[in-house]
Each structure stands twice: as structure tokens, then as C-alpha cells.
Amino acid sequence: MERREEDNVEKKRIRDFGIVPGRLETGKRNKITDVPGVKVGHCTIKTEENHTGVTVILPGEDNAFGEQRRQPEMKRSPE
């Protein structure tokens, strides 16, 4: 398989452009797996005809939809 030059380029995150998504602080590694109980799996299928994959995120043991969690209030800029 042929290597492309762009494969060796470091990819930037959205925060590198000054955009801060969400209201909560990031975790230690800034990854979804920083959240206790969250499990992530991934599978890639690579053939001559296809290059595809799937990612599975298991949110944890508790029912995230049945249990309401209070989020910190957002600070709004004065109008």
C-alpha cells in the first residue's frame, strides 16, 4: 500500500483554532474515554474496493436518559 504525505501530517483539533465546544472542562487526556464507565470500540475494513469502519460507544451502566444531571450554568455575554 502506498503512503500518502498527508498521512504523516499532525491533525489539529477544533480547540487549536480557538473554538471551545461544550460547557464542561476536558478530561485528563481530552478523550471520550476520560468519562468513567464509557467504553469505545472500533473496527476497520480495508479491501481493494472499500475502506470503511464503525465505532461503537457504550455510555456506561447507568441510564443516561432516565437520570437527569445538572449542568453548570453557561455564562452569557451582555447584550
Image (cartoon, rainbow, N blue to C red):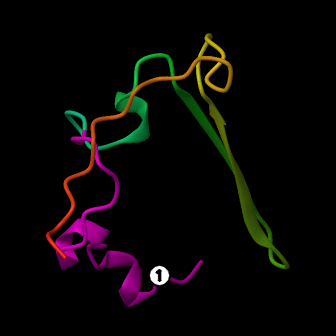
Report the label total. Answer: 1
Question: Measured from the top left, where is residue 70 in percent x and y?
Answer: 40, 26
Name the residue that disc number 1 marks.
Answer: 3
How many residues crowd around disc 1 within 10 Å: few (fewer than 14), some, or many (20 or more)? few
- Is 59 located above or below residue 25 in the figure? above
* Residue displayed at 21% across by 41% down: 25
- State the quadrant of the C terminus: bottom left
The three-letter amino acid code for the residue at tag 1 is Arg
Q: Is residue 27 magenta?
A: no
Q: 30 or 48: nearer the eye?
A: 30
* Residue displayed at 34% across by 53% down: 22
What range of the chain is rendered magenta?
1-26
* Residue displayed at 80% across by 77% down: 48
- Is 59 located above or below residue 2 in the figure? above
* Residue displayed at 19% across by 33% down: 28
Helix, strand, or loop for circle 1?
loop
Quadrant in the rendering for residue 18: bottom left
- State the quadrant of the N terminus: bottom right
75 relative to 11 in the view: left or right = left
State the residue lying farthest toward the front.
79
Q: Is the magenta region chiefly helix, strand or loop?
A: loop
Question: Measured from the top left, where is residue 7 in percent x and y?
Answer: 40, 78
State the residue lying farthest toward the top.
61
43 relative to 75 in the view: left or right = right
State the residue lying farthest toward the right.
49
Q: 49 or 61: nearer the eye?
A: 61
Quadrant in the rendering for residue 36: top left
Question: Measured from the top left, where is residue 20 in percent x and y?
Answer: 25, 63
Quadrant in the rendering for residue 12: bottom left
State the residue lying farthest toward the bottom.
5
